[in-house]
Image: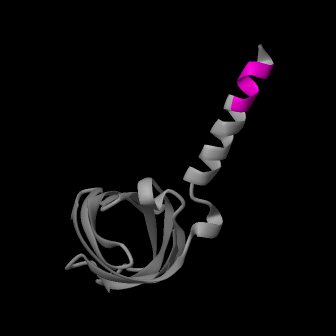
Amino acid sequence: MARRHAPTAALLAAFTALALPTAADAKTYRANLHVQGKAHGAAVNVTVSGSPLGRCSGTGRITRAGTTYNLRCRGGRIRMRSKATTGLADRSRGRWQMLGGTGRYQRISGAGTFRGRLSTGSFSCTGTVRY
């Protein structure tokens, strides 16, 4: 009985290998993103726009470790984290990192720096993104 299923298993493995993107398929992009956020206590509503992601929107949660965002973008979802290195005053600077994603962004990675103003919730992010 095991012999009868062996060709089926081999065929399934071959189709799976063709259908799934590999790390070699990923491309590296320069990230130039604008983030606009509005905090409501520890919760944040955020819009991210710019290259290479286009326009994304979502929510975030502010903690002592930084802010984690869950973004909905065309083609999938992205999880992103930021951590301020300065920011007790209105002007804030820090680092951001891509944590993962779904769909087109399933294997997203990347990191960079940000700067902006806490009073307006407007930040500029630069760095690299790979997906």
**Residue 123 location (% of width, % of height):** 31, 81
Q: Give the main secondary structure of the magenta stretch.
A: helix
**Residue 5 location (% of width, % of height):** 71, 23
Name the residue rendered at 41%, 82% in the picture: 114
Residue 5 magenta-highlighted: yes
In terms of image quadrants, where is residue 38? bottom left
Name the residue rendered at 75%, 27% in the picture: 6
**Residue 13 location (% of width, % of height):** 67, 41
The answer to whether any part of residue 45 appears in the image is yes
In this view, the residue farthest toward the top is 1
**Quadrant of the frame with the N terminus:** top right
Looking at the image, is 9 positioned above or below residue 130?
Answer: above
Closer to us: 4 or 27:
4
Q: Which residues are magenta?
A: 3-7
Looking at the image, is 111 positioned above or below residue 11?
Answer: below
Closer to us: 13 or 87:
13
Closer to us: 126 or 52:
52
In this view, the residue farthest toward the right is 3
Name the residue rendered at 46%, 71% in the picture: 83
**Residue 75 location (% of width, % of height):** 35, 59
The answer to whether any part of residue 63 appears in the image is no
In terms of image quadrants, where is residue 49? bottom left
Q: How many marks?
A: 0
Q: Is residue 22 left or right of residue 83?
A: right
Residue 27 magenta-highlighted: no
Name the residue rendered at 66%, 38% in the picture: 11
Looking at the image, is 10 positioned above or below residue 123?
Answer: above
In terms of image quadrants, where is residue 62? bottom left
Closer to us: 40 or 9:
9
Q: Is residue 20 left or right of residue 66?
A: right
